[in-house]
């Protein structure tokens, strides 16, 4: 049995969950999310708790059991608390700013890079070098954060670039380190 899949999902007070066959809709104080789960799993709601069970023991059902439970748990967590990712920009002259809804990055290219966040995702900039991506959908928050980091990933010699907050970048010695 999947260790993750068999764990129950507690439903907070202000969150309502509607299960209609394979379609799960979660509504909470921050918004609402819905998702259609694969046919190999079923969602059962019992007095303030959700259980994700697999219909049979086929290989595909076992593979999707833990995934489906995690997706539903992330939906419940997102509509009640939301998700947030922080990125740091390091480098001389590197900075970020928000223009309207778009994020504008000046990270050493000849032109500023504009990134438009998807609907439901907010981007904020603190002291020109810290970017905060927040929203209720964990997948969208993570994808946008990865897109922002991919504009200028941290390089190993000087450490310049965009990194996740708390990310460790292994440094290399460079030319002077050969002696």
Image (cartoon, grey):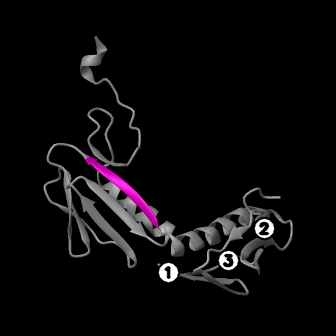
The residue pinned by badge 2 equals 61
Q: What stretch is highlighted in magenta?
A: 83-89
User: Under tag 3, what secondary structure?
Assistant: loop
Q: Distance between the residues labelled 3 and 1?
A: 23 Å
Is residue 146 in view from this perspective?
A: no
Report the Cα–Cα distance between label 1 and label 2: 32 Å
Mark earlier in primary sequence (1, 2): 1
Query: Quarter of the image holding residue 33?
Result: bottom right
Q: Which circle's residue, 3 or 2, is located before the other in the chain? A: 3
Q: Is mark 2 on a helix, strand or loop?
A: helix
- Which residue is identified by label 1? 29
Vertical side of 130 occupied by 54: above or below: below
Horizontal and vertical percent for residue 167? 41, 43
The number of numbered badges drawn on the structure is 3
Magenta-drawn stretch, dominant element (helix, strand or loop) = strand
Q: Distance of mark 3 from mark 2, alpha carbons?
A: 12 Å
Measuring 30% from the left and 58% from the top, which residue is drawn there?
A: 131
In the rendered structure, does residue 77 fall within the stretch colored magenta? no
Comparing 131 with 81, the one in front is 81
Q: Which residue is drawn at 28% across and 46% down?
A: 161
Crowd tier of the residue under label 1, counting other residues whose Cα lies within 10 Å: few below 14, some 14–19, many 20 or above: few
The reply, left or right, for residue 109 in relation to residue 58 is: left
On-image quarter of the N terminus: bottom right
* Residue at the extreme right: 57
Residue under label 3: 37
Tag 1 or tag 3, which sits nearer the N-term? Answer: 1
Q: Quadrant of the C terminus?
A: top left
């Amino acid at each position: 049995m999947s260790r993750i899949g068999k764990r129950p999902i507690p439903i907070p007070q202000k969150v309502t969950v509607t299960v209609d066959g394979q379609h799960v809709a979660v509504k909470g104080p921050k918004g609402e999310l819905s998702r259609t789960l694969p046919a190999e799993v079923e969602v059962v709601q019992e007095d303030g708790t959700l259980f994700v069970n697999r219909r049979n023991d086929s290989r595909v059902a076992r593979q999707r059991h833990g995934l489906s439970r995690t997706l539903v748990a992330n939906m419940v967590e997102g509509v009640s608390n939301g998700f947030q990712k922080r990125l740091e920009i390091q480098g001389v002259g590197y900075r970020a700013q928000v223009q309207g809804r778009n994020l504008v990055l000046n990270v050493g290219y000849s032109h500023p890079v504009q990134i438009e966040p998807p609907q439901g995702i907010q981007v904020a900039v603190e002291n020109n070098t810290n970017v905060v991506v927040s929203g209720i959908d964990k997948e969208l928050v993570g994808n946008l954060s990865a897109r922002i980091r991919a504009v200028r990933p941290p390089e190993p010699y000087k450490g310049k670039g965009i990194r996740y907050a708390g990310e460790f970048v292994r440094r290399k010695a460079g030319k002077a380190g050969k002696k």
